[in-house]
Amino acid sequence: MRKLIQFFIDRPIWGNASIVIIIMFGLFTLFNTNRSFFPEEAPKRIIVSVTYPGASPAEMEEGITIKIEQAIRGFNGIDEIRSSSQENFAQITVIAEDDADMELLFNDIDNAVNSISSFPAGTEPPTVTMPKAFGIASIVAFVGVSAKDENANIADLIDVSNDVETALLNTESITEIEKTGFPDKEIVISAREQI
């Protein structure tokens, strides 16, 4: 240690050069380090969503949710399976173990879900997603829109949800909203064969 100190005393240029190099590396690291108020985490969830227009929660549970749970139950890397069945929509959330290979698990679940051929007629193709995790900022609240009348038109529910979305986005504190559970709008054109 004494020799090192003596070296820098005898050669002050080397001491100054070392300080400059350390400061340069520090500034380089400071400006190139990724920073985020809510840091992004590795995804640990896989979500399977299925829409079945006109189905009751019991029909969603029996015809879709249970079948998906049975198809994916035995895969390695799954820590927990949570499911929710409601009118027109079912969602199955797979929570993975900490050391799970998420790409492999995602592919296994996607293949298993898309190979189910016994869904009720009218069920839309299931979607399998692996959302990014943003820690405490990932999900703040759920807002549900449902009708009191069993014969309510789904177009009316979509309009109400759009109004709610617009009202929430007009506040300064909400930056992003994700809507799930509604089928895509379709345009049907009926033409008479005879004029």
Image (spheres, grey):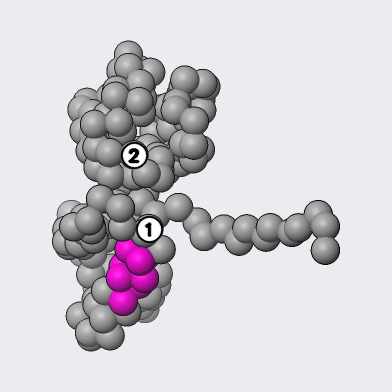
Residue 105 placement: quadrant? top left
Give the residue type that dot 2 points to: Ala
In the image, farthest residue toward the top: 74
Please state which of residues 25 and 77 is positioned toward the viewer in this rendering: 77
**Which image quadrant is residue 162 in?**
bottom left
Residue holding disc 2: 55
In this view, 17 is above or below 104: below
Q: Secondary structure at mark 1?
A: helix
Q: Position of residue 27 (x, y in %)?
A: 35, 76
Count of residue discs: 2
Task: Examine the structure image and report whether residue 144 is included in the region drawn in magenta.
Answer: no
Residue at x 35% of width, y 21% of height: 67
Q: Alpha-carbon neighbours of circle 1 within 10 Å: few (<14), some, or many (≥20)?
A: some
- Give the residue number, with chain letter if any, for mark 1: 154
Q: Residue at x 22, y 56 (%)?
A: 149
Left or right, residue 100 beside residue 80: right
Q: Amino acid at mark 1?
A: Ile
Q: Read off the magenta span.
A: 156-163
Q: Is residue 94 visible?
A: no
Pick the residue in front: 92 or 145: 145
N-terminal label among 1 and 2: 2
Picture coordinates of residue 29 (x, y %)? 36, 68
